[in-house]
Image (spheres, rainbow, N blue to C red):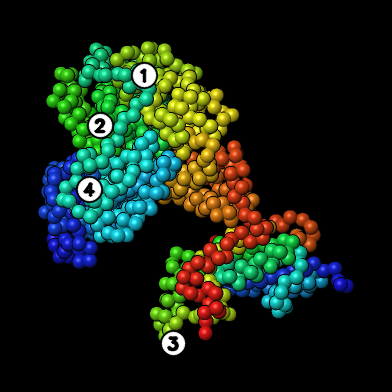
Amino acid sequence: MEKVNKRQINWIDKNNKMTQIPTLLCMTSPSVPYEIGLTEKHLNELEADHFNGQLNRKDLLQFLIAIQQRFGWICKDAIAWCSHRISQLETGISEQEIRGIIDFYSFLEKEACPPLHLHLSTNVTDYMLGQQDHQAYFETLAKEYPKRFRVTNTSCTGLCDQGPAALLNGLPIPALNNSIREAIRKLVEEQPAKIDVAATFPTPQDNIQLKDQLLNRQLQSGNAIKRVMTNPAEGFLGELNAARLRGRGGAGFPTGFKWQTCADADASQKVVVCNADEGEPGTFKDRVLLHSHIQQVIEGMTIAARTVGASLGFIYLRFEYQYLLPMLTAAIEERVTQNLLGDAILGEEDFNFHLHIHLGAGAYICGEESALLESLEGKRGIPRIRPPFPAQAGYLGYPTIVNNVETFCCVAEVALTGGANFASRQCEGSTGTKIHSISGDCERPGIYELPFDTTVEDILKLVGAKNTQAVQVGGPSGKLLFPELFHEPVNFSHVSSGGSFMVFDESRDLFNVVKNFTDFFHHESCGFCTPCRVGCGVLSETLDKFAKHHASDDDIQHLREMMELMDVASHCGLGQTAAHPVRFLLEGKPDFFKNKETTDSVVKIDIHEETSAARELHLANAGESHE
Amino acid sequence: MSDNKVKVATCSLAGCFGCHMSFLDIDERIVDLINHVRFDRSPLTDIKEVGHCAIGLVEGGLCNEENVEVLKAFRENCDLLVSVGACAINGGVPAMRNNIPLEECLETAYVNGIGVVDPQIPQHEDIPPLLNKVLPIHEAVHVDYFLPGCPPPADAFWELLTAVLENREPNLDYSLRHFD
């Protein structure tokens, strides 16, 4: 510690006193009331409690999240401490690199933060349910109590069927209304040391509207594994191939092929990862599966571990779903005591599987599997160049399979009822069922499990949608469908979906919908490659011009060129699809853009608006007041 | 009017006149050019108001209200409007202020600057108000051609003008678009 001591760390910043945030009862950290501030002692304790007394490079993100959760922000001395601790190991890390990580993840703060921090969700469905009103209210509140309360925005929180939603110090509050607003105001005014979020505010509901095989399944822990264990490990690959199971995260990659690649790889260690970073706006089915069907998920992961020969597993849980953490941890612990996890599972020698939960910290891109692996290793979530594919070299270079939450539920189903049976329900090669998260303009939003021959029209009828103008299937990176295509079934051959289904009726201005999605991508671009980082910004700003009626044909041309460039030159899927919302609307309903073109034939900008800063300084129209 | 020469107007908005200097680097070819074109509003002629022209060459981006007015007049009067050089196309050096609040920029230059006498932010009816951000000209008007470079090479001007006079599409060789 010499290096650190020499600098004589003053743990309490002179200007920004680092007070502890009120402990939220459903959080995992032990409940400690307001404390004087973060000290070296706290960091040592955290390290000893959660990281076996030695902070590793790969634990860094989890450590930063732990500091963030307990203290509300990460001060520069904590950064110095982390850098120093990790640099004692072979793989050192500079303070700058750590600051880069903090900047990358949107829930990590490196500036002093008031003890209560509210994140309002900005998905289009939240706005459709009146988010703007709450935004204005909380902004006023934050102005009243700048030292106690802050309000900022965050991307979709996975509560689209019960919005407008928010996170209070990371814990979800669905269905904001006046009484919730008042309750938050009361907390700000009274500053209690402990806040029981679950008791004070409504909790997220499952809201399951229609069940089929996956959601009807009540799995007796271990039953699926026991069935698989009657055969040798590789035997299950045959079942998977017979099931023709395809990944449920959105891309629809054949699961059997992925697992085969991993099983074939020669390595001392293999890894199974469950992708619970459900970031695609409008998707919330994984939240429900984690909440109410966790046994199927873990069982599926354990089967994967046996099949490919993995002994290490992670659930990558998005930050927004951290309220599920105590429940998930308990489920894992229970299974360890049942010998369904851990060493020599159910007595089978060499069948070891150790499952951990890894929290995300607010980054949509970490839903992309290679970015997720980077994040698991404690780094910024920047997608890797492939090959090698994760199934060949993934987490720390070990062959790794990454599958969606729902895919693992399907795996458990295949294990229980057999691959042929699973494949018997199929439509044009898509087998099994699909869980959809439905939100927007309809009478009964929520979770629907549907067979693959269900058309968009069927779904709209089912959810009670009237006068539907368009549907966004598969989230912003999916497709914007107009009534001409409502007869298409939602499956891998026609309209592919990861589970997001947002309905817009005729009262909606689709331009605003597309603008919302484009702004989302602009915010979530990881910044690694220029076509995406700059392209998203250009799209967003160009749409701003339309919104202000300052755009012209030139801007439509400009949009087209930018879409083309992003499509061919971006590093990963985010940049390649970021322009899709604009493209679908421009090709489907160009009038939404044409209506917003400028009426001035010569000058497109509003000179009054463009000189607003000068006017504020009393520099514009100076002549009137001058002498 | 007795002559049937093609009329050309030029101006420099938020630019440094470097593009104009580069234009003059066509050297003796300017004699040939004068046989075919007549300059309207331009720093070369000192005509203040732009008349109807076939070609308008605009150097520099938009940094104040007056720039916008001049550009508007050019767009209304020129059949072909050409965005000339890095500042007109991208904002260039003047746009470096875009990430700094206007007040801070002015205070740094006129209040806190080294050696400033009688510090104050200049304010007079004759001083056009600054825009919030320096804009490339195609943000404000339709532009027909872009002549890249800082400055564009003399040969690029030459190619543009000869192409328009010969009624064909201008075609810049790679060497005229490559600046390493």
Amino acid tagged 2 = Gly
Q: How far from the left and from the top, in percent, is residue A378?
A: 27, 45
Q: Earlier in the sequence, mark 1 or mark 2?
A: 1
Q: Nearer the viewer, residue B153 or A549?
A: A549
Q: Could you give the CA–CA distance between mark 4 and mark 2, rounded to whole angstroms? A: 24 Å
Q: Could you give the CA–CA distance between mark 4 and mark 1, rounded to whole angstroms? A: 38 Å
Amino acid tagged 3 = Asp
C-beta proximity under 8 Å, tags 1 and 2: no
Residue farthest toward the right in the current orientation of the protein: B2
> Can marks 3 and 1 be said to lie on one chain?
no
Q: Chain of mark 1?
A: A
Residue at the disc numbered 3: B118
Give the secondary structure at mark 2: strand
Q: Chain of mark 3?
A: B
C-beta proximity under 8 Å, tags 2 and 3: no
Q: Could you give the CA–CA distance between mark 2 and mark 3, rounded to whole angstroms? A: 70 Å
Residue at the disc numbered 1: A212
Number of the label disc, if any, that sits on residue A313: 2
> Can marks 4 and 2 be said to lie on one chain?
yes
